[in-house]
């Protein structure tokens, strides 16, 4: 079944095939790797898929690409079918005979791949958007609490460069503990508070 003796010839064949395939999808742009080899298509609205050539089988493998976080420091975080649950989702993928014409391969992709890929992609995009909104809401609430205390919010000590800053330090002299913010609640962990401050805190809590 193998049609090419060298991987270089196979790569050139695959690049030409992807280039021709891009013409079958209006608005699509061919994806290139660091060496300039074309290996998939990108569309204007989130959609993208790779086209990998299997030299031994002389077939193309079409697989979906998945959205990444748009938050600073999280560019490598991907939202894929493995992140989905209730129900779980499979990774859509098909193989196509590489001897088929670009028109035939495009028809296979539209009929056999995109019909399964698009619903899963929509769920992954929703998961990405929900995650970003969660981070933004947490950060806004943490900053609000921090401002009231004359402090600043910060990220988790073990997660450097994270866009999430849910922790607020206690003001000096209050005692030991921490404040951690979620998007709809705040967890106060106070301990070793002086007796005088404990009395004031208890009196304040009674007013809530």
Image (cartoon, rainbow, N blue to C red):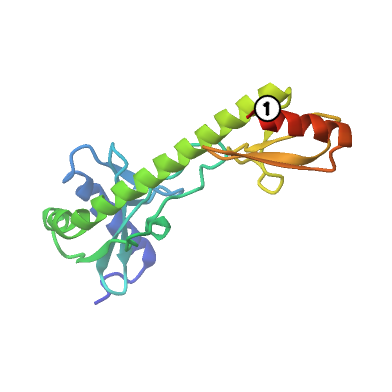
Residue 87 appears left or right of 189: left
Residue 127 appears left or right of 144: left
Residue 35 x, y percent position in the rendering: 44, 50
Q: Quadrant of the C terminus?
A: top right
Residue 12 appears left or right of 181: left
- Examine the image and state in which quarter residue 182 appears: top right
- Examine the image and state in which quarter residue 111 appears: bottom left
Residue 1 x, y percent position in the rendering: 24, 77
Tally the marks.
1
Image: 28 above or below 57: above
Observer able to see residue 170: no
Of 116 and 23, the residue lying toward us: 116
Of 11 and 22, the residue lying toward us: 22
Write down the residue under mark 1.
146
Q: Residue at x 12, y 55 (%)?
A: 107
Q: Residue at x 52, y 37 (%)?
A: 184
Neighbours of disc 1 within 10 Å: few (<14), some (14-19), many (20+): many
Residue 25 x, y percent position in the rendering: 18, 44
Observer able to see residue 26: yes
Of 77 and 141, the residue lying toward us: 141
Residue 87 x, y percent position in the rendering: 32, 61
Q: Please tell me whether mark 1 sits on a helix, a strand or a loop.
A: helix
- Examine the image and state in which quarter residue 14 appears: bottom left
């Amino acid at each position: 079944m193998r049609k090419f003796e060298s991987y270089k010839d196979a790569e050139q064949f695959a690049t030409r095939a992807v280039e021709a395939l891009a013409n079958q999808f209006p608005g699509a742009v061919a994806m290139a790797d660091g060496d300039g080899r074309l290996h998939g298509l990108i569309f204007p609205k989130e959609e993208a898929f790779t086209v990998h050539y299997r030299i031994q089988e002389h077939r193309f493998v079409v697989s979906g690409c998945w959205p990444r976080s748009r938050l600073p420091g999280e560019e490598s975080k991907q939202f894929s079918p493995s992140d989905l649950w209730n129900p779980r989702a499979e990774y859509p993928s098909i193989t196509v005979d590489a001897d088929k014409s670009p028109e035939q391969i495009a028809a296979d992709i539209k009929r056999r791949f995109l019909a399964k890929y698009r619903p899963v992609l929509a769920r992954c995009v929703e998961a990405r958007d929900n995650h970003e909104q969660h981070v933004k809401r947490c950060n806004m609430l943490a900053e609000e609490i921090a401002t009231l205390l004359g402090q600043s919010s910060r990220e988790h000590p073990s997660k450097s460069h994270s866009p999430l800053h849910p922790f607020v330090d206690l003001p000096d002299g209050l005692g030991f503990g921490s404040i951690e913010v979620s998007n709809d609640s705040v967890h106060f962990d106070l301990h070793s508070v002086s007796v005088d401050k404990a009395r004031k805190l208890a009196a304040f809590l009674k007013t809530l």
